[in-house]
Amino acid sequence: MTILVTGGAGFIGSNFVLDWLALSDEPVVNLDKLTYAGNLTNLTCLDDDARHVFVQGDLGDRALADRLLAKYRPRAVVNFAAESHVDRSIHGPEDFVQTNIVGTFRLLEAVRAYWGSLPEAEKVAFRFLHISTDEVYGTLSKDDPPFAETNANEPNSPYSASKAASDHLVRAWHHTYGLPVLTTNCSNNYGPFHFPEKLIPLMIVNALAGKPLPVYGDGMQVRDWLYVKDHCSAIRRVLKGGRLGETYNIGGWNEKPNIEIVHTVCALLDELCPKADGRSYKTQITHVQDRPGHDRRYAIDARKIERELGWKPAETFETGIRKTVQWYLDHPEWVANVQRGTYRKWVAKQYKETNE
Ligand code: NAD
Ligand code: TYD
């Protein structure tokens, strides 16, 4: 048996592939375009591991998907591949429409043709698991209950709109064609291999580089945070036991305002890697112009996956964030590597008015 993963060289995908192969011998075919966010060095430890087959390519390349499906005959496809950064989607939404919507559509079509050709027993066992985000639900006020799976989709950014569109395609391919799909909508992840364009890794690498820590607006926007390894365990659980056609919210029960996250990161760095001048990293915090259309609050009601599949996160925010900060301190070469080239251009474009 084999699974096909898309986007397995990105942040969550590479954690998923590494955990998968640490826990089982079932091979993984990893289809990834290697955009700026894809990084094969995340998977260096699998270089000589025959259970991991890496293929550089686009999830929207129908001929390639057909070939891979026919050759490796996976029992499941797990679709991580996406453009994933809200700020980039504001600057340039086109790639988000292409990859997240058109790419998912083409992959669904390839998978539908493959699935339709399978013998009955394999057809029944097959799964298409689509990885999505809580951002499809839109934004919450302070006193609203957390997002449940039954909430309407009200996406507000080009990123979340493109993810919501892909979720709808996946749903329709089940309803209309009977494709055995599952969808997960997860809150903000953090952990090893997180690209430093996102809040937590950006704060860590900027702090260590003595650069400003750019907090958008008042910093009181709330996100729910989940350690990436917990997301991966939830995905495995849904793949194994999720009910066909269902969506499962995944979250960490860790709602926190951004400014509190930044303070926590600074406090950990003060403890683990104190500044030479004895001052706190907090002195580097700068409030900068807010993101346009910035969602104020996300929160996840993760009771369905707990009730139906018995999944709960293993890490608290305190344990997960400590591991994460320590990982960045232990991997300066990874950080230096991902900060080369196009990363510099992005930072210059996004933060030039404030901290360049
Ligand atoms: P990421 O940006 O770190 O990685 C995305 C990966 O997809 C990269 O390896 C990239 O090369 C690849 N990719 C991009 N376009 C592609 C294409 N056209 N064809 C093939 N590969 C392509 O993203 P991530 O944070 O790992 O997120 C993975 C998935 O999880 C996404 O679908 C995202 O929407 C979802 N998600 C992310 C979070 C989060 O907090 N990061 C939370 C919930 C859901
Ligand atoms: P991000 O990591 O981009 O994830 P998302 O927008 O998908 O939730 O941002 C998390 C929160 O941190 C979000 O409210 C925006 C905020 N943020 C900053 O305040 N400063 C930054 O430089 C970045 C990248 C994000």
Image (cartoon, helix red, strand yellow):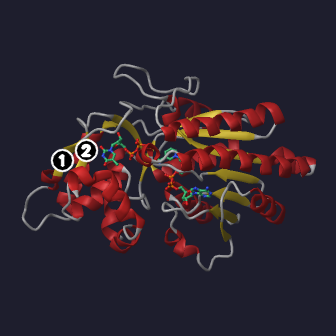
Expressed as whole percent of the image width and height from the top left, the position of residue 80 reads 60, 51
**Quarter of the rendering occupied by the N terminus:** bottom right
The relative height of residue 89 versus residue 147 in the rendered view (above or below) is below
**Residue at 28% over, 44% down:** 261
* Ligand 2, image quadrant it occupies: top left
Expressed as whole percent of the image width and height from the top left, the position of residue 67 reads 80, 63
Q: How many marks?
A: 2
Residue position marked by numbered label 1 in the rendering: 286
The relative height of residue 85 versus residue 41 in the rendered view (above or below) is above
Q: Secondary structure at mark 2?
A: strand
- Looking at the image, tell me whether mark 1 or mark 2 is earlier in sequence order: 2
Q: Amino acid at mark 1?
A: Thr
Q: Nearer the viewer, residue 25 or 180?
A: 180
**Residue at 78% over, 30% down:** 175
Q: Amino acid at mark 2?
A: Val
Residue 327 in view, yes or no: no
**Residue at 70% over, 66% down:** 27
Q: Are marks 1 and 2 in contact (CB under 8 Å)?
A: yes
Judge the density around disc 1: few (<14), some (14-19), many (≥20) Cα neighbours within 10 Å.
some
Q: Nearer the viewer, residue 52 or 10?
A: 10
**Quarter of the rendering occupied by the C terminus:** bottom left
Expressed as whole percent of the image width and height from the top left, the position of residue 206 reads 25, 59
Residue farthest to the top? 143
**Residue at 46% over, 36% down:** 157
Q: Is residue 333 left or right of residue 230?
A: left
Gap in Å between the C-alphas at discs 1 and 2? 6 Å
Q: Secondary structure at mark 1?
A: strand
Judge the density around disc 2: few (<14), some (14-19), many (≥20) Cα neighbours within 10 Å.
some
Q: Is mark 2 within 8 Å of ligand 2?
A: yes
Residue position marked by numbered label 2 in the rendering: 215
